[in-house]
Amino acid sequence: MFDTNELVINMGPQHPSTHGVLRVVLRLDGETVVDAEVVIGYLHRGIEKLSENRNWTQIILLTDRMDYVAAATSNVGYCETVEKLMQLEVPRRARYVRTILCELQRIASHCLWVGTHAMDIGAMTVFLYAFRERELILDLFEEFCGARLTYNSMRIGGLPLDIPPGWDKKVLEFCKIMDGKVDEYETLLTHNRIWLERTRGVGVISGAEAAGLGMCGPALRGSGVPRDVRKDEPYAAYDEMDFDVPVGVNGDTYDRYLVRMEEFRQSLRIIRQATEGLPEGPIVGKVPRLIKPPAGETYHAIESPKGELGYFIVSDGKSTNPYRFRVRPPSFCNLQALPRLARGHLVADVVALIGSIDIVLGEVDR
Amino acid sequence: MIDTFVIPLLQIVIVLNATLVAVTYMVLLERKVIAWAQSRLGPMRVGPYGILQPVADAVKLMIKEDITPVRADRWVFTAAPIISMVPALIVYAVIPFGPRITLFGRSVPLYITDINVGLLYIVSVASVGVYGIILAGYASNSKYPLLASLRASAQLISYEVAVTLTLVSVILLAGSLSMVNIVNAQFNARVWFGFAQPVAFVIFLIGGLAETNRAPFDLPEAEQELTGGFHTEYSGMRFALFFLAEYANMIVVSSVATTLFLGGWLPPFPNTPALHFLYFVPSWAWFLIKSFVFLYVFIWVRATLPRYRYDQLMRLGWKVLIPLAIANLVVTGIVKVLIG
Amino acid sequence: MGEAIAFYTIAAFVLGFAVLVVSTKDTVHSVLFLVLDFLFVAALYVLLGAEFLAVIQILVYAGGIVVLYLFVVMLVNLKRPPEAHQDRNRRTKLGFGLAAAVLLEIAAIAAYSSARPAPATAAATGVGNTEQVGWLLYTNYLIPFEIASMLLLVAMIGAIVLAKREL
């Protein structure tokens, strides 16, 4: 009856809940989102181009800074790609420690995710509880490699250092503490009626559509697609570990939340197995002093906490720098789905959706 | 002469000052309680254990630059925070902190006045307080605060209906609109109305949370919300007034809830001879303890629960609370007629 | 004596604000002056000893109806240019003439009714204003009350029909 025109609202790049410098331009009809346009690039540092001027070992430093929330995973992915191209054998102990570190990173990343996601929806306290546990993990990492955020904790062929004595006992103690804490987060959120109303039915996407958009990781698994690189193409020591991959049913924000909460518990399971069964042996394989992979190209993917993190490297066999270094960041591919997810929802839901997809701008922009 | 002018004037001065001090310390209390819930300490630097933090906040807000947006309506812009704050303060004229006591050989009432439409007065004054929010959004001369303020005020007037309906149930039980008579009715009935009217009590608490724009109903002023809320353009002392008005409203809701549902100045199970020792605690102390419990619950709820989306909030108010309140009213009426 | 001072002061305010309501250029200011007007009228009711009516005046009129006026005014945003205030079709002399006629009529009614003996009002016992109004409203004036609530129901349904997009 009355003529209403669309309102264009700009969210970000500086905004308390866009998890970094993300800009989303929303077109609204009243309060319903008609379309969302995602504008990225505010954190672009040229990592892929920079790496063409670094030698293969120096690039490990750069991979830290992409997904700075789960830096060790990025390191592992890159090192394994180069090892695949060079056909290097990584000793079993190194593979086990890599597994432990990757799973610790998964827990740390999910802690940050649950904290920020809950805080965006209004539950402030979960944020502080989750960060309290994340501090425990960061302490473990600091003891291992001396850094809290950008670890540089892998080398091509293994690890730079062996774990300090007593570190594995500390890891097991942490696992015991963390189990109780995950229960605490679940008590505050999982059956809370306000949480259910805010997340059930928000951002529903079917498995086929999600896969078609290139989504990966817990966001895809929430829609019912059981794709997990750790199971489908095992790397590090995952083929020797016994764990389950949680898969959702409805593909809404609540299911993605449940998938990640269950992943907490599965990661703890893997860490326990890997720490208790840690084999003796060398920590780094037979690696030439100057790393010069033979000419060729390869792609290798791992399961980072955000999804399938893939590296594609091209070596020309002659120089010590890569010819081309390309990253397939999971956050970038998942972010593509945001316009499709946000359509038809209210403005307040967009914030919940960004948290549900779990992006890190360092990875999206590189 | 003394009874009609001097004593009320003295009471007004005391109550106003106490309220304003309480409001500023509410800010500190909230920060401390939320911090403890989140396993951290809260303000600790200013004064021992952070006790002087409100002083630091007040000084900071007072020395901030006073910015008025260009082409904003100057009079309305200045008036809006005042319109928000004043209703919260003048409600104290009818809230009874205690019965008549003898002080220095004089019979002094522990309430400023007792008008025989006291409860309605409180409700009407609260409904005038909505203007502060509407005008704040309007006077900022900017699209987003205007829309946010209209949403916030729509939320307020919706929950006002539910809250007023619960108050009617209490009036039915007490048979009077005067606040002192309501407390006396609880004395005569030997039970707090919170036990006699649990549904009304719960609806009043939820409605009170929504009326004061507190979590989980604080979407209109949450920082994560796009439009920054109705007080975006306010800074310095004007913003401080809005901020304090919110806490003053919280204290008012707590006081009203105490008087209506928890027996005001009465100890638990009033008028039972066996528990006469409870009168050892002075009446106003009971009142303050109970109000404080409510305030603590308000802060506790904020620390724990996530936030409702606006449409869910309105749906809760209109489709759940109002029918419940009406049903409660009907049942109360029927029971009152049958039992008398 | 004190009552007379109070009455004349409040009445002066009421009239002053009423004039401002119609004379101010800004529509929002006009609505705000109306609110102030209603508050002072409530004060007049208190002077008359009708405290229930005073509180209801604030609650319903100032706190409900005018809020809705304000919503509409703000959303429609009537900031007209000054030229629009010069209306060539306005019949100023006729307007003043009609207003004077109405004033004379009201004065005549007031004089006539003060000449007649006042009807016996219910003795104001210790029973408060609220109870008296309540008794009358639900016994003698029940039918007007029900008709008024029907009217409000119709208005609500009309508003919902207008505002809903699809029914």
Image: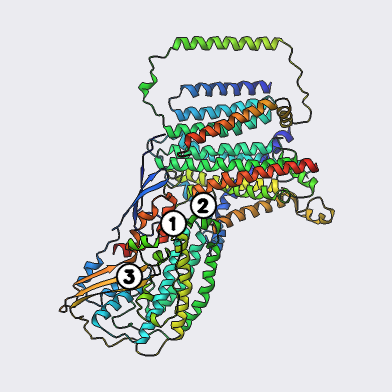
- Check the picture and name the quadrant holding the N terminus of chain A: top left
Looking at the picture, which amino acid does disc 2 mark?
Tyr
Residue A80: image quadrant is bottom left
Q: Estimate the spatial distance between the alpha carbons at disc 2 and disc 1, rounded to whole Å.
A: 12 Å
- Residue position for label 1: A352
Judged from the image, the secondary structure of the residue bearing numbered disc 2 is loop
- Residue position for label 2: B308
The residue sitting at 28% across, 72% down in the picture is: A311
CA neighbours of label 2 inside 10 A, class few (<14), some (14 to 19), many (20+)? many
B60 vs C51: above or below: below
Residue at the farthest right position:
B273
Check the residue under mark 3 and report the chain it is in: A
Looking at the picture, which amino acid does disc 3 mark?
Leu
Q: Is residue B14 visible?
A: no
Q: Estimate the spatial distance between the alpha carbons at disc 1 and disc 3, rounded to whole Å.
A: 23 Å
Q: In the drawing, does residue A110 fall left or right of residue B209?
A: left
Judged from the image, the secondary structure of the residue bearing numbered disc 3 is strand
